[in-house]
Image: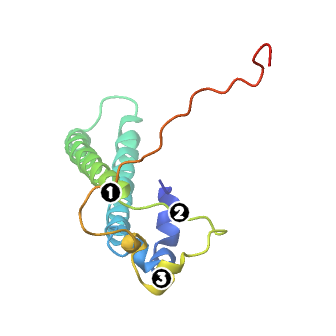
Amino acid sequence: MLSREFLRENASELLAEMPERYAGSGIERFVELDLARRAGVTRLEEKRRRRNELTAVRGKPEPEVVLEMKALKEEIRALEEETERAEAELGEVETGIPNAPQSTVSPSRSARSGRNAMSCLPSSGTAPKPSTWAPVRAFNAFAPGE
């Protein structure tokens, strides 16, 4: 599986260089979900930072601060659930994206011609013929007395 960072940085290049491999893989959806998830995580961290600032004050907090902390608690809980859902959906989309071939691998002849690589196989739907190969009796090269 490709790393999220690699997909994030190279999605357009993958689609441009290998459209037959990545056209229907969901890489576009991955980029959208990843951006939304990252924005949600940023909002969540900002709310947590504000909550930490409010709890760092010594002494009895003002009533307005208590109300703000309660509101932050609910917002944080909602953002955490949203982030978990986005993470799960992102993981599902991510599993459908194929790996990129190594740079040393050249495209196959069938891929360059636009044909399916499996088109050389018979499409009659019949099973392959059974093998007629049978094992031969063991040959003992070191038989005594020969």
Q: What residue appears at the point 47 percent right and 43 percent down from the top-left corner? A: 133
Residue 130, image x and y in percent?
Answer: 36, 48
Residue 52, image x and y in percent?
Answer: 39, 40
Mark 1 or 3: the one toward you:
3
User: Which residue has dot 3 on it?
Assistant: 16
Label 2 residue SS = helix
Above or below for 111 versus 82: below
User: Which residue has dot 2 on it?
Assistant: 6
Check contact, mark 1 vs mark 3: CB within 8 A: no
Q: Quick one: label 3 or label 2, which is nearer the N terminus?
A: 2
Label 1 residue SS = helix
Q: What residue appears at the point 75 percent right and 17 percent down from the top-left corner? A: 143
Q: How many marks?
A: 3
Of the 4 image quadrants, the one containing the C terminus is top right
- Residue 74 placement, left or right of 118: left
Real-space Cα separation, disc 1 to disc 3, in angstroms: 29 Å
Mark 3 or 2: the one toward you:
3
Label 3 residue SS = helix
